[in-house]
Amino acid sequence: MNSEPEKNPKSRNSRFIPFFLILLFAVVIGLVIRHYFTKQYVIPHQGGLEVYFSDGDSTNSDISLEKILVLKLNIATEKIDAALYHLDSDPVTDALIKAHNNGVNVQVMTENSNVEEEDIQRLLRAGITVRDDGDNEGYMHHKFFIVDGRYVWTGSYNTTYNGAYKNDNNAVWIDSDPLAANFTQEFREMFVSQEFGKSSNPHNPYPQITLNDGTMIDTYFSPENDTISPLLSEITSAEKSIYFMVFSFTHNEIGDAMRMRFKDGITVEGVFDEKQISKHSEYEPMKKFGMDVKIDETSGTMHHKVIIIDEETVITGSYNLSKNAEMRNSENLLIIKGNKEIATAYINEFNRLK
C-alpha cells in the first residue's frame, strides 16, 4: 500500500525559522511596550516613594493622577481609609465600591460642605460608611488614602475631574508602615472620635521616619501640631535656594522669613495662582521686595502646596501657606529629605510652571 510521500524536512525547517523569528520579535516588542506603559505603576518594595504630577489641561492624557490612583486602590486586599475634602470622580468612586464589594473594609471621611456630592451618595448607597466633620469651624482639607495599613497617598490633588485633568497638582505614594500609622491615627481621630482642631492628639507615633533608601520624612498634622516652627526652620536653614509653588500664600510670617533669606543672598523664586491674588496674598509684598515671583495664568488652577529647599528638601501635602491651614483646617504636611530624585522631580515641575 502506498503511503503519502514524506515532506522535505529542509523545506519545513526553512519555513519554521522565519516564523519563529517573527514570533520572537513580536514577544520582545510586546514586553518592551508593556514595560514602557506600566513602569510608572510598579508597586515599590517596602520603603519606596513615588511622586506624580498632573500637567494641567491634560484632558486627553492616557496617564493621569486619577488613573494612577485607581491602579493603587486596586491593590487593596484588606482596608482603605480615605480622608477626602472633595470626591467628584466616577473612576475613583468606582474603585472604592469595587474594593468594598470584594470584601475590603472601605471608610471615607469628607468635608461637611461636600457631603451631598453625588459620588459621596453613591458610596453610601453601596454600603460604604462615610462620615463628615459636622459644623467644625475649619475645613476637613485632607486628600489622603491609606491602603492596607502600609501605603499612603497624599498631596494637593483633590479627587475631582478638574483636579486630575485641568489643575496643576502633585501626589506622593509612599510605602511605609510607620507613615501609614501616623495617617491612620489622624484618620481615626476624625472618623471614630470626631476630634478636630487643637483638641486632637498632637502626638504622632512616628514623627520622623526613614525609608529603606535613606529618605527621611517628618509628618505634621494641623492644627494640633506646630507646623510653623518646622516650616520656618527649613526656610531659615536654606543655603542656596528656596523655590515654591503655592495655591494660597497669605501667611505673613512665612513670607517675612523668605524675604529675609532673599535679603541674605539666597535665591527665592515662586509661583502663585492667579485666582488667589488678593490684598492678603504675599505676592505683591514679595514683588515689591524685588523677588522673582510669578502669577500662573493658565486656564486651570495652580493648586500645588510645595516648597523646595536647596534642591534637596521637599515640603508638600494639603497645607496651603495660610493662617487657616495653621490654625483651623485639618491638614497634613510632609517634609521629605535625602531623596535627590524626588527633589529633582519637583524642581522640574517648578521649572515647567515658571
Image (tube, rainbow, N blue to C red):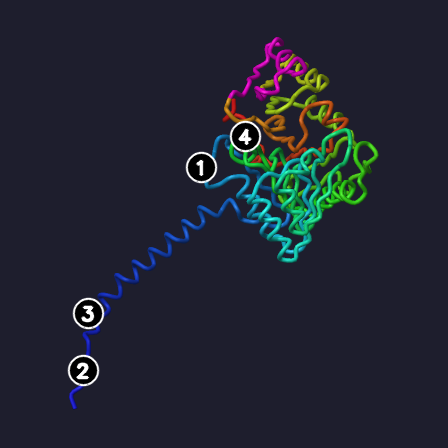
- Pointer 3 or 1: first along the chain: 3
- Pointer 1 or 2: first along the chain: 2
- Give the alpha-carbon distance from disc 3 to disc 2, as whole Å: 17 Å
Q: Nearer the viewer, mark 3 or mark 1?
A: 1
- Give the alpha-carbon distance from disc 4 to disc 2, as whole Å: 72 Å
With respect to residue 290, does 298 lie above or below? Answer: below
- Give the alpha-carbon distance from disc 1 to disc 2, as whole Å: 60 Å
Q: Which mark is residue 11?
A: 3
The kind of residue tagged 1 is Asn
Q: Nearer the viewer, mark 1 or mark 2?
A: 1
- Give the alpha-carbon distance from disc 3 to disc 1, as whole Å: 50 Å
Residue 14 is left or right of residue 167, and the answer is left
Residue 5 is left or right of residue 160, and the answer is left
Residue at image mark 4 = 167
Tell me the SS state at disc 1: loop
Q: Which mark is residue 60?
A: 1
Residue at left offset 69%, top offset 40% = 83
Does the stretch in magenta take in 277? yes
With respect to residue 338, does 243 lie above or below? Answer: above
Residue at image mark 2 = 4
Mark 1 residue crowding within 10 angstroms, few (<14) / some (14–19) / many (20+): few
Q: Nearer the viewer, mark 4 or mark 2?
A: 4
Magenta highlight range: 270-297
The kind of residue tagged 3 is Ser
- Pointer 1 or 4: first along the chain: 1
The kind of residue tagged 2 is Glu
Task: Please identify the quarter of the rendering in which residue 14 is found.
Answer: bottom left
Q: Are marks 1 and 4 in contact (CB under 8 Å)?
A: no
Q: Are marks 3 and 2 in contact (CB under 8 Å)?
A: no
Q: Which mark is residue 84?
A: none
Q: Nearer the viewer, mark 3 or mark 4?
A: 4
